[in-house]
Amino acid sequence: MSNATAPTGHRLRSLVRELPIVLGLLTGAAVLAHWSPGGDPAGAAGIAWSAWLVVAITAAAFRAMGHADHVAEHLGEPLGTVVLTLSAITIEVAAVCAIMLGSDGDPDVARDTMFAVIMLILNLFLGIGLLIAGWRGAEREFNPQSSGAYLPLLITLSGITLVLPRFTTSTEGGWMSAPMEVFVGVSSLILYGVFLVMQTTRHRAFFAHEPARAEDRRAEAAGHHRPGMPLWGSIALLVLSLLAVVAMAEGLGGRTRALLQAWYLPLPLGGVLVALLVLAPEGMAALVAARRGEMQRCINVLLGSAVATIGLTAPAVIAIRFITGATPEFGLHPPFLVLLAISFFVSALTLVRGKVSALHGAIHVMLFLAWIATILDESSAP
């Protein structure tokens, strides 16, 4: 009797785990069919629907990253991290583009989201990961060639996308001329494509680190062979969960800006919200890796996501700009330029040796808090 009921119980648990994907697909279908509540987004029905969208998107995103992680285990490093990264970026690009279009071409959401992703990754998630990994006092090691490859690319992409537009003279403010937008979009896409090819071919060793202890090696090998859903099943459910997130993101479109305005909150917090939504699964995966002492996996996931954010989101937003005419503003304001520069400088110092400690984590978390304080300070200025 027990042997007969065991497979049934396992199947039931598997179905329950995939419930967020089913609910996400149903919610996305309702959004696309315009069955969602109308009226004031700040009203009771509007707030309840927005809250449901946030919960449903987050749950579906976690399932997407769960299946992406299963696919990644089959592929190994660094291909596994590439799958995780591209899955997360698909969610992010969909959310940014949907909110940009749904809010009548909000010119700031793409810039605020890309900057928020960088600050969350380099300061909050990396900082907490270092605190968790180094809490017992020991330094954690990783292959410094990985951060040596990620950081220069991230700094270059961020420089031409978020910094240079603030100083070009063809247009005022943080906007770019059409030819400059084409250059930024194409160069970002090409540079990320070259990096992706190098990461998965001749420079694979840069992004791998042999665990130092025998038990780590045994645990890693066991993780790659744990029983579960077949590979094709995880790939199919990954695609379905990503489709659900893309459809639901459209429903979150014009509501984010309207809610922030109704509650007198700083508009850049919209970018923080989008970034948190899309980074939650990947950020949690990185923190779990840090808790296990797998700093190489943690750094690959975090820095890979940051690089892909700039390399893929900027070209997608610029393409939408030429299709819809909604011109995005990319250049950061001066206080945020300073924080970006400090974050890059401190990250380079932290990761250059291939050894990190809890002290480094505390510094990065403090930089994250300084960013939040700057957002609130900017919004309170007359």
Image (cartoon, helix red, strand yellow):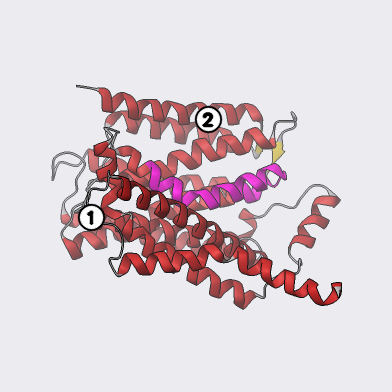
Q: Is residue 177 left or right of residue 219?
A: left
Q: Is residue 80 positioned above or below 371 on the image? A: below
Q: Position of residue 10 (x, y in %)?
A: 73, 69
Q: Is residue 304 positioned above or below 350 on the image? A: below
The residue shown at (54%, 52%) is: 281
**In magenta stretch: residue 297:** yes
Helix, strand or loop for disc 2: helix
Amino acid on which the number 2 mark rests in the picture: Val
The residue shown at (33%, 43%) is: 270
Magenta range: 272-298
Q: Position of residue 228 (x, y in %)?
A: 71, 70
Numbered mark located on residue 181 in the image = 1
Numbered mark located on residue 217 in the image = none
Amino acid on which the number 1 mark rests in the picture: Glu
Q: Earlier in the sequence, mark 2 or mark 1?
A: 1
Helix, strand or loop for disc 1: helix
Label 1 crowding class (10 Å Cα cut-off): few <14, some 14-19, many 20+?
Answer: many
Q: Is residue 112 positioned above or below 363 on the image? A: below
Disc 2: which residue: 365
Closer to the camera in the image, 173 or 88: 88
**In magenta stretch: residue 352:** no
Q: Which callout, 2 or 1, points to the residue nearer the camera?
A: 2
